[in-house]
Image (tube, helix red, strand yellow):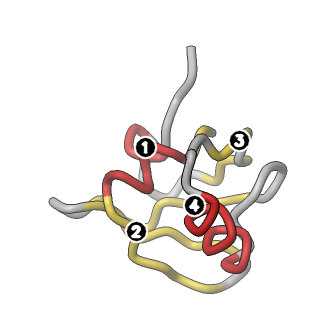
Amino acid sequence: MKVTLREAVEGKEYIIKSIETDDEELDAFLFSLGCYSGEPITVVSHLKGGCVVSIKDARYNIDNELAEAIII
């Protein structure tokens, strides 16, 4: 069973297993944030339209569509 970032528990660190998107720009964008396979990621908080994540000591606000593409 694959778990996406949307189902992540707030404050718990996960390791990104894969990014499932057909959009190369989105892939490149996530990679530029340091969001790729093998990288630790933490959901700081869940919002109605997405969530706030912590990657490499930086915080990003990502929408639900993006959160669904990140497999942990």
State whether residue 57 is above or below residue 26.
below
Q: In which quarter of the image is residue 58?
A: bottom right
Q: Residues within 10 Å of mark 4 (few under 14, many from 20)?
A: many
Q: Where is residue 20 in the image (x, y as percent from the top left)?
A: 60, 41
Residue type for callout 4: Thr
Label for residue 68? 1
Q: Residues within 10 Å of mark 1 (few under 14, many from 20)?
A: some
Q: Name the residue under label 3.
A: 18
Q: Name the residue under label 4.
A: 42
Label for residue 62? 2
Q: Residue furthest right?
A: 38
Residue appearing at x 49%, y 68% in the figure: 53
SS for callout 2:
strand
Q: Position of residue 49 (x, y in %)?
A: 20, 62
Q: From the viewer's perspective, tell me whether residue 2 is left or right of residue 47.
A: right
Q: Quadrant of residue 36?
A: bottom right
Q: From the viewer's perspective, tell me whether residue 51 is left or right of residue 43.
A: left
Q: Position of residue 59 (x, y in %)?
A: 52, 82
Residue type for callout 3: Ser
SS for callout 3:
strand
Q: From the viewer's perspective, tell me whether residue 18 is left or right of residue 71.
A: right
Residue type for callout 2: Ile
Q: Nearer the viewer, residue 48 or 11?
A: 48
- Pointers 3 and 1 in contact (CB under 8 A)? no
